[in-house]
Each structure stands twice: as C-alpha cells, then as structure tokens.
C-alpha cells in the first residue's frame, strides 16, 4: 500500500483485518509511527478497530498487488520507492484522480501488470496511524486494457472477500472518465468559490452546468459514453455541505491536484478539438490565484 493516508490507510487496515499481510510504503516519519503504534480506524462502514502495521520507506520484496493511494502531486516521488524489480509480477492499481497517471505507470511497470482503479469514499488521515472513514461506502472500480482479465477478476474477488465493494468494468477509459466527469465540476467550482456544493448549485448554477457539459463532451470524444444529465443529477443530489478534496487541500495551503483534474481535461479537449471555455477560465483563475499566493 503506497500512501497510508485517508484512502490507503483505510484499505490497508481493512485488508489486514481480513488476514492479508500488508506492507505500507511511506515517508520515514509515517513509517516509524505505523511500525510503533499500528493503525486505528473509526469507520461508519467497517466499525472501529485497530490493527498492527508493517511499514517501509522502500519496497524490497515482491507483492501480489501494489495499491497506490497518493495524490497526483506526489506520485512520482512515491513510485521512486517502488522499484519495478522489487515488485515482482504483482498488479499495480492506482486509486488516483485524473487520467494521465496511467501513462506514467505503464512507463515504469510492465503494462500487463497495470490496472486502472477509482474509489469513491470520504476518509481522512487525522494523524499518522489514525483514520476517520465518514462515508457509509467505499466503492472501488477496476478495469484494464493491458492486464489479463482473469487476474483482474481474481484480485477483485480477494478484495470483495475482505469486505470491500469492488466492481470490474470492461472499459478502462470509461471508468476513469466517469469519475473525472463528476469530480472536475465539483473540484474546480468548490475550490474557485471556496464554498461547498450547495452554494455552487444556488449561486453558480450556470457555471456548474457549463463545466459538467464541457467535461462530458470531452469524455465522449475520448471514447467514454458519459451522460451529462446523469452527472448533473448526481451533483444535484449530493449533500449541500460537500466539499471537494482539492478545496480542502487549498484551504490547508497544500499542493492541489488542479493539473491532474482540470489540466488533464483541457489537454484532452485540445487533442480532440472540443471547446471548453468555462473549464479553461476556472483552471486559469485557480492557477493565477495559486501563483499569487506563492509570491
């Protein structure tokens, strides 16, 4: 498990509780805390529990599967701690936002071992070794254009036996774009307005509809059958108090996934000749604000 944060810590702890040997790849201070005190989870879905933990700063032994649960902003640094020769023939599953990370992973690891993954969950690392999982779900979807389907199915079955909700899909592009089509409007608008989704729906409705429509058009041009009406309906039904992880990162003055989310949409739009004026405006405004804050 690369990155024992809110997502990685939760999944690793659930797998460990189910009897799977888990090794966490983490920064030195986090690795020391996990080795000393283990992982404590408070979860709406899985209950409250504690498991011991084994953590290293660099993978040195083969594994069956390598789940990557870091932010896109720290992906390259994290993967430097997972040498391909140490991984063996284990599958690599990134649970990241965006779409472009798949190219980098297939450049580092054999393509037959790389599986696309997405997760929908609200889970936070309170401190090193302490995870608060506040959503009553942790939905994982996986698909791969390059890994053998039987290996992907076998992995999904193991995760399901541990209590995780896992679906195997046939189309990798559709899997990745389905999440990005929902995430991009939410992340860009809540971060730009520094407001939760309910405020966006009431005060920036035109922008919400425009960005959702633009991203859906890009997704369709990329080969994913994303339904604009369905995505907008999901955003309308989501809790009014919902914030995006990018907004929370901006509030805490942490690096944001603006490029992985908004930037990847704009680059795909350019490749496919799709006009995305509102998305481009929001991305440029956020980039300008970030540059000003760094001065």
Image (cartoon, rainbow, N blue to C red):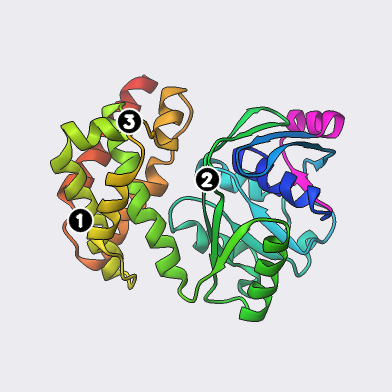
How dense is the environment of label 2, judged by Cα within 10 Å: few (below 14), some, or many (20 and up)? Answer: some
Q: For the point 62% across and 60% down, which residue is it?
A: 93
Residue at the far left in the pictured view: 206
Question: Does the CB distance between marks 3 and 2 fall below 8 Å?
Answer: no
Q: Which mark is residue 121?
A: 2
- Residue situated in front as seen by the camera: 252 or 111: 252
Describe the element under mark 2 as helix, strand or loop.
Answer: loop
On the image, the x and y values in percent for residue 198 come to 28, 33
How dense is the environment of label 1, judged by Cα within 10 Å: few (below 14), some, or many (20 and up)? Answer: many
Check if residue 144 falls in the magenta segment: no
On the image, the x and y values in percent for residue 83 come to 73, 56
Residue wearing tag 3 = 196
- Residue situated in front as seen by the camera: 56 or 270: 56
On the image, the x and y values in percent for residue 121 come to 52, 45
Residue 152 visible? The answer is: yes
Describe the element under mark 1 as helix, strand or loop.
Answer: helix
Q: For the point 48% across and 28% down, which residue is it?
A: 254
How far apart marks 2 and 1 lie (CA) works out to 24 Å
How dense is the environment of label 3, judged by Cα within 10 Å: few (below 14), some, or many (20 and up)? Answer: many
The residue range painted magenta reads 21-38
Q: Which mark is residue 213?
A: 1
Count of numbered tags: 3
How far apart marks 3 and 2 lie (CA) works out to 17 Å
Q: Nearer the viewer, mark 2 or mark 1?
A: 2
Q: Nearer the viewer, mark 1 or mark 3?
A: 3
Q: For the point 40% across and 68% down, which residue is it?
A: 174
In the picture, measured across the screen, residue 216 lies left or right of residue 241, that is left
């Amino acid at each position: 498990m690369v990155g024992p944060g809110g997502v990685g810590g939760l999944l690793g702890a659930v797998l460990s509780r189910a009897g799977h040997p888990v090794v966490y790849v983490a920064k030195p201070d986090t690795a020391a805390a996990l080795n000393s005190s283990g992982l404590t989870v408070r979860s709406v879905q899985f209950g409250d529990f504690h498991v011991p933990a084994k953590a290293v700063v660099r993978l040195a032994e083969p594994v069956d599967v390598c789940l990557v649960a870091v932010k896109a902003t720290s992906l390259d640094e994290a993967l430097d701690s997972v040498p391909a020769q140490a991984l063996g023939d284990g599958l690599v599953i990134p649970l990241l936002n965006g779409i472009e990370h798949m190219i980098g992973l297939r450049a580092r690891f054999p393509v037959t071992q790389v599986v696309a993954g997405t997760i929908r969950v609200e889970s936070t690392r309170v401190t090193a070794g302490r995870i608060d999982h506040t959503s009553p779900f942790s939905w994982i979807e996986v698909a791969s254009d390059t890994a053998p389907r039987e290996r992907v199915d076998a992995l999904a079955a193991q995760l399901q036996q541990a209590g995780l909700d896992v679906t195997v899909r046939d189309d990798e592009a559709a899997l990745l774009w389905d999440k990005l089509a929902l995430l991009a409007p939410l992340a860009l608008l809540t971060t730009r307005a520094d407001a939760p989704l309910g405020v966006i729906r009431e005060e920036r409705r035109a922008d919400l509809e425009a960005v959702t429509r633009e991203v859906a058009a890009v997704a369709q041009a990329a080969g994913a059958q994303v339904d604009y009406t369905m995505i907008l309906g999901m955003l309308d039904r989501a809790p009014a108090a919902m914030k995006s992880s990018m907004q929370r990162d901006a509030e805490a003055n942490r690096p944001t996934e603006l490029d992985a989310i908004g930037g990847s949409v704009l680059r795909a739009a350019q490749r496919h000749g799709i006009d995305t004026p509102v998305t481009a405006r929001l991305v440029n405004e956020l980039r300008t604000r970030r540059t000003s804050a760094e001065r």
